[in-house]
Amino acid sequence: MLLKERLNKLDFSFFKKKGFLISVGAVLGIMLLVLIYGLTVRGKMLDQAVLKAKQKLKEDYQLDLRIGSYSFAGLTTVDFKKVRVLPDSAQQLAAMDDFKVSVQLFPLLSGKVKFGSISMENADITLVKEDSTSNYDFLFRKKERDSTQTDTSSRSLAETVDRLLQQVFLKVPNDMQLTNVNLSFQDSSGTQVVRIPTGEIDNGDYDVDVFLNDQEAKWNFKGEVNPDRQTISVAITSDNKAAEIPFIRRRFGLRVSFDELSFRMDDVTRKGKDGLQVHGGWSAKNLQVKHRRLSEEQISLPEGSAVGGFQITENTIELLPGTKVQVKDFAFEPRLKYSRKPKKLLNLAVHTGRFKAQDFFDAIPKGLFDNLEGIELEGEVQYDMDFEVDLDNPDALKFSSKIDDAQLKVKKWGKANIAALNQPFVYEAYDDTTKLRDIIVGPENPSYTPLNQVSSILKKTVLNTEDPFFYKHKGFELEAFQLSIVTNIKEKKFKRGASTISMQLIKNVYLNRNKTMMRKFEEILLVWLMEQSGQVSKDRLLEIYLNVIEWGKNVYGIAEAGQYYFSKKPADLTIGESLFLSSIIPRPKTGLSSFDYTGQLKPWVLKHFNTYGYIMTKMGQLDNEEVPGNYGFYQVSLREPLRPARPKGLVDSMHTHDEIKEMAEEMDREERLRKTLIERLFGPQEKKEEN
């Protein structure tokens, strides 16, 4: 009985194995038949593929693809001879004597074209720029949408990024051989050539030398790439430490050099259709950057790195928790998230924890903030910032910024010696980048006016117009920042800053000529240190401010302004004259445009008078002041030599239509700011009453 059971099991096992072998044999047989069929028709298929490629390049990009000959050089390798790519009405873009490419068989059976190996010999890719045209214009030409094309708008963000990664790595071969490959750029200033004498990827590993203009500079690219796992690493080192990256200086005016740059993508993790995580990092050693819009000096980053990655879902992309940025001894973990649905939300957060203040300032790249170089600090600080904005509804902005700097002490100032503001100093007055003159801010200057010799009403009007919370804040007004951000998002360009009097002072005294993108950040840091140190009093800051700001063309300081417009000393200015002077601070060179040929103020200036007169009345600031009707609007009279000529027609033609339009837009923006200020000071009901 036991023997019979064992025989039955043996028979079953035998037939099971036999069935499996038959199935495998059938599959292999089918594959063999497909392969035989493919080999018999592959020549025809290749002809069709080449023809289709030529047609697509012609129709979509106006490129003419010419091939001397092509043939199979193995089972899946195609050898192309004498390949040329010529744009319509432009010089030749690319030429290759020999180009071999193979595709992997199994991905091909599933409809995916994945390169197995690439070989390129005697190849020249030439980018030519002539006047306003180039032979690479097709890269920036918009294609007409094909009505038969699949709509991709319904794809999730994770799907989109996943497809992109797959497409890129499908085109990256496991093996590649380059021999005498040149990339050149030509324009009216000359030619630059990047040359690769020999280079190869061997089973994913590569070590390639790249030369600029025949030994002028040399870079080494070393690392590994795994198209199947979708990972890549590259370390780029330079033998010539001062060698600039080619092309970008002529194209963008940007000079970049480095000792070493590295990048890696360590892992791509998929979590269902709508979940994707990309892990990696980058690092740099002795990175040098120079561009006139970034900084007047060369920016030098000795060392910096970032490690972490991104998480992408159906409608969001965000930094992975723990993503860290480190520069020298300063490190922080930023949080960044963008959501496209149901609202277009952008979230940014920085929570540093406690860190040494000196570590932060030591980490600032040299040349970025010239006025801060050499500063010495002691103590720890902590910074916390949370930012959220709905890009379709910026009025719902959420923004908080807090700093714990109670332990911070400035031991030594850098180039910008804030403590020196307590003594007389020389202010350099500039019109844009043209120096006009030196102005002594001190008693040696007969036009210098101490704060106690400025009329009280002038001080009140300037403070209310420019910075009503000057004596309460520490250099920054959070709500002003919020309003500035909201306005700039709505305008889709930078239209309004959030400058307090402290910020304007720093900008005028230390950053007057600096028109770079980084100026605002340098301004913020200087204001923070100035206010936190308490080494300069608020009264002294206001005094300097009133003596250095511009009030008209080459008119600096309140003494010059009072004399220029009204032949008066600062102590004698009336409420109307003070309100006028406060109105032109944002646009000092347009001050005379506020007057008509009779020397009276134009009607549109009255709104400024009524708004700020109303604010000062409600705050009790006019209780001891002489206040005529309309806050002195009709008593303001420009001195006669400055009055414009009587217009020939009914329209005063001092300004062009565009200038008048720009002034009107600026007045509208200021009106929105004034209404917001009134609502903040007195509440919505008072805003309604003032209107």
Image (cartoon, grey):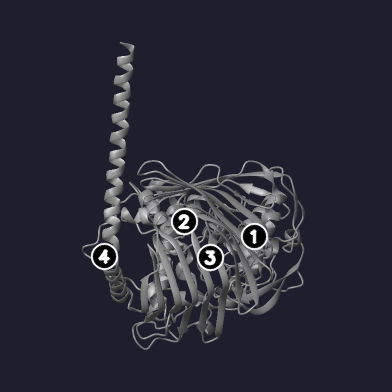
Q: Position of residue 245 (x, y in %)?
A: 59, 71
The local secondary structure at tag 1 comes to helix
Label pair 4/1, CB-CB below 8 angstroms: no
Residue bearing the label numbered 1: 542
Residue at (50% x, 64% y) in the render: 176
Viewport quadrant of the C terminus: bottom left
Q: Position of residue 530 (x, y in %)?
A: 68, 55
Dots 2 and 4: beta carbons under 8 Å? Answer: no
Circle 4 is placed at which residue position? 41
| Mark toward the viewer: 3 or 2 | 2
- Position of residue 512 relative to residue 279, above or below, is below
Per the model, the C-alpha gap separating discs 2 and 4 is 64 Å
Amino acid tagged 4: Val
Quadrant hosting residue 77: bottom left
Residue 386 is left or right of residue 161, and the answer is right
Q: Which class describes the residues within 10 Å of circle 4: few (<14), some (14-19), or many (20+)?
A: few
Of pointers 2 and 4, the one earlier in the residue sequence: 4
Q: Which mark is residue 485?
A: 2
Distance between mark 1 and mark 2 Cα atoms:
26 Å
Q: In the image, what residue type sits under mark 1?
A: Leu
* Mark 1 and mark 3: Cα distance apart in space: 14 Å
